[in-house]
């Protein structure tokens, strides 16, 4: 009988251990639970202790976690944009020809080999048209990327505004709730909302003496002050405006962080820069070929006998082949200035070294290849930085869980040990029951 009593007590103790550790594991992400400064514990010696004070994750630990969330999100949103931009610029294939410049060079070379000097201009004329078509396709694609990015920015800004209103309401409720249990529940909701907000923007959270949270941007611009929330607006050319009542201020892009900061960094540092770079290549191409065809290198030259580059209705650049027919190329015509035939001048223009803003001098074909290479390098850098930020986030979450008093690995190991203890005592109890039944049978 004593054996049965001991085994039964062991089963009860093991069951208590299992229940308590399961509760700790299930509540690991519940900030209101960990904020109570306790975790449920038990002893395997037959006594059960309901609670034991342990370390707790305070506001500073939460700030570190939110900062890590923001850093990872800022890079994560840039990855698909960077790869899409690289694809538009020809990808990583060094032989890619997104503007058709190599095709145009081949057409000129082929015409130069025409037997007997009887130059047929149809191939060159068609290749020139394809250059204009491909340039416009690229400009339209890049402008489409810009429009889509602005739509995403506007959508994310609205999500931020909804979260800041929620936080202001929770601050108000926190001040009005009379009991501690109610305040803890509201604090849990508030931390959850801040965790969501941190994915969109790098927040600086400060707590006042009443327990209210004030939420600021990294540069100190207030998003939430007590029960008042400001509103963000995404500006179409990049950046954001913060509106609070009659006050309206622009927020520096570098101070945003999170998804909003990632969108704007890509918009200003990658996409808009590449649009400007491709526009410079197209402008130089049109000017070089037009001057060569007109045999005019004067500073006052502005004619467009072959190509023109203008601004379309959407604001994006647009290239047009201004020449009506292939015969208008006059490829076999001699220069009145002694500069050779038109064909040779066009070949010289396309192979000439040009100087583009912020670029090493080279041919236009080389300039396009360099743009693709730079974009590929930036995509790789963003990928690598995102991997590093992901590791920082994992570390921050691990540290937060440890500071909150529940270590997932330790708790899981303890759970397995308590399960073994339960099964062992259950087997002993089963044997004791069988012995007890056998003893009763013998007595009868």
Image (tube, helix red, strand yellow):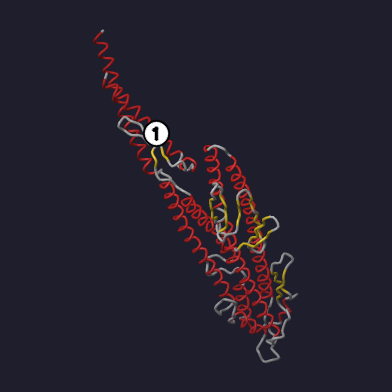
- Sort mark 1 into few (<14), some (14-19) or many (20+) by Cα contacts within 10 Å: few
Dividing the picture into quarters, in which one does residue 46 lie? top left
170, above or below 388, in the image: above
From where the camera sits, is residue 103 visible?
Answer: yes
Quadrant of the frame with the C terminus: top left
Instruction: Please name whichever residue, 96 or 37, is drawn nearer the observer in this view of the structure.
Output: 37
Farthest front residue? 209
Quadrant of the frame with the N terminus: top left
The spot of residue 159 in percent (x, y) is: 62, 50
Q: Residue at 71% across / 77% down in the picture? A: 306
Q: Residue at 46% across / 39% down in the picture? A: 27
The spot of residue 359 in percent (x, y) is: 56, 76
Considering the numbered disc 1 on the image, is that residue within a helix, a strand or a loop?
A: loop
Q: Which residue is tagged 1?
A: 50
The spot of residue 176 in percent (x, y) is: 60, 41
The spot of residue 184 in percent (x, y) is: 52, 40
Dividing the picture into quarters, in which one does residue 95 lie? bottom right
Side (left or right) of 173 relative to 315? left
Farthest top residue? 444
Farthest left residue? 442
């Amino acid at each position: 009988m004593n054996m049965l009593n001991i085994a039964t007590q062991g089963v009860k103790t093991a069951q208590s251990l299992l229940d308590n550790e399961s509760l700790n594991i299930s509540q690991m992400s519940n900030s209101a639970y960990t904020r109570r400064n306790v975790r449920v514990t038990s002893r395997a010696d037959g006594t059960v202790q309901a609670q034991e004070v342990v370390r707790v994750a305070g506001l500073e630990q939460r700030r570190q976690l939110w900062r890590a969330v923001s850093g990872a999100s800022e890079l994560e949103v840039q990855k698909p944009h960077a790869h899409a931009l690289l694809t538009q610029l020809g990808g990583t294939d060094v032989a890619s020809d997104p503007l058709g410049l190599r095709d145009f060079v081949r057409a000129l070379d082929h015409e130069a080999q025409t037997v007997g000097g009887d130059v047929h201009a149809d191939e060159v004329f068609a290749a020139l048209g394809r250059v204009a078509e491909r340039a416009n396709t690229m400009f339209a694609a890049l402008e489409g990327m810009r429009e889509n990015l602005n739509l995403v920015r506007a959508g994310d800004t609205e999500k931020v505004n909804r979260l800041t209103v929620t936080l202001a309401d929770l601050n108000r409720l926190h001040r009005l709730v009379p009991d501690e249990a109610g305040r803890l529940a509201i604090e849990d909701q508030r931390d959850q909302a801040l965790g969501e907000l941190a994915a969109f923007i790098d927040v600086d959270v400060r707590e006042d003496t009443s327990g209210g949270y004030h939420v600021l941007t990294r540069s100190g611009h207030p998003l939430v002050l007590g029960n008042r929330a400001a509103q963000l607006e995404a500006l179409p050319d990049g950046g954001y405006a913060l509106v609070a009542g009659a006050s309206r201020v622009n927020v520096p892009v570098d101070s945003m962080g999170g998804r909003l900061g990632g969108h704007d960094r890509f918009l200003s540092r990658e996409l808009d820069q590449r649009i400007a770079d491709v526009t410079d290549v197209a402008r130089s191409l049109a000017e070089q070929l037009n001057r060569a065809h007109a045999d005019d290198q004067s500073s006052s030259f502005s004619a467009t006998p072959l190509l023109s580059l203008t601004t379309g209705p959407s604001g994006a650049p647009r290239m047009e082949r201004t020449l009506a027919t292939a015969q208008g190329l006059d490829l076999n015509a001699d220069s009145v200035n002694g500069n050779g035939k038109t064909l040779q001048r066009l070949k010289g223009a396309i192979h000439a070294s040009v100087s583009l803003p912020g670029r090493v001098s080279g041919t236009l074909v080389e300039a396009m290849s360099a743009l693709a290479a730079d974009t590929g390098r930036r995509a790789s850098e963003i990928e690598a930085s995102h991997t590093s930020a992901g590791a920082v986030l994992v570390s921050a979450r691990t540290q937060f869980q440890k500071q909150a008093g529940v270590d997932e690995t330790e708790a899981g190991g303890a759970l397995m040990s308590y399960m073994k203890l339960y099964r062992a005592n259950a087997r002993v109890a089963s044997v004791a029951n069988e012995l007890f039944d056998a003893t009763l049978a013998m007595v009868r």
